Image (spheres, rainbow, N blue to C red):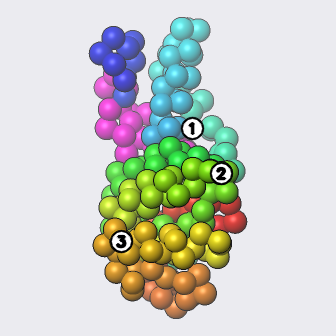
Amino acid sequence: TSQTANYSISSIEFDKSGTTFILSDTKISIPLFGSAHAYSALAAISVARQLGLNLKEIQEALTSLPLIERTMEVKNGKQDAILLDDSYNVNTDGVLASINDVNASNYSEKVFVFKELLELGDETDEELKRIIRSAAKVFNHFVLMQSAQRPKIRTLLLEEGIEPEQILHPKDQERFTSLLNEETIILFEGRGT
């Protein structure tokens, strides 16, 4: 947000209950995960304040925001792992924002479950490189779902310095399960994940 904005947020944090941020020395919580949701909430707060609502009324309303299916939808996983279902995402910038949100979270084990974004069309190769370059800096492990781009995605990960043992096959349930605990966050990107 700019210095001329009437409202700005700081200290955005994420956990399994959603997103918290500070607005004018007030802690605001929303039941949605991600910075995009925080900034959408900021826009709603701005409008609500213009309509005369106070921050307490607004905060109360924000706690009951509806979840958006497959859009950074938080789900509880086995052994208290957090699953972020962002499988509806169809654009590179949205995937990169989700990767950045996971990076900003306090979870120590970060797993990326990925299938190519079919909607990229002719830009698939360059956009895949952007996504993999970003993901390789954030995630400890990768699960590549079956797709025509899977060999290319694996090669890109290896080129980014990811070790082969960090790349799991979707059928390798035992290895995958061994990663799960309360410090694990798993981001699902690409339809069909």
> How crowded is the residue under tag 2: few (<14 C-alpha within 10 Å), some, or many (20+)?
few
**Which amino acid, by three-letter code, is at mark 1?**
Thr
Q: Position of residue 135 (x, y in %)?
A: 41, 61
How far, Cα to Cα, is label 3 from label 1?
Answer: 43 Å
- The residue shown at (31%, 72%) is 161
How far, Cα to Cα, is label 2 from label 1?
Answer: 38 Å
Indicate which disc residue 77 carries: none
Mark before the other along the chain sequence, 2 or 1? 1
Mark before the other along the chain sequence, 3 or 1? 1
**Which amino acid, by three-letter code, is at mark 2?**
Gly
**Which amino acid, by three-letter code, is at mark 3?**
Glu
- Answer whether labels 2 and 3 touch (C-beta < 8 Å): no
Q: Position of residue 177 (x, y in %)?
A: 50, 84
Determine whether the residue tagged by mark 1 lies in a helix, strand or loop: loop
Between 176 and 107, the one nearer to me in the picture: 176
Indicate which disc residue 159 carries: 3
> How crowded is the residue under tag 1: few (<14 C-alpha within 10 Å), some, or many (20+)?
some
How far, Cα to Cα, is label 2 from label 3?
Answer: 23 Å
Of tags 2 and 1, which is closer to the observer? 2
- 30 within the magenta span: yes
Q: Which residue is mark 1?
A: 63
Q: Position of residue 77 (x, y in %)?
A: 56, 71
**Residue 1 picture quarter:** top left
Determine whether the residue tagged by mark 2 lies in a helix, strand or loop: helix
- The residue shown at (51%, 13%) is 49
Of tags 3 and 1, which is closer to the observer? 3
Indicate which disc residue 121 carries: 2
Range drawn in magenta: 10-32
Between 131 and 22, the one nearer to me in the picture: 131
- The residue shown at (64%, 67%) is 193
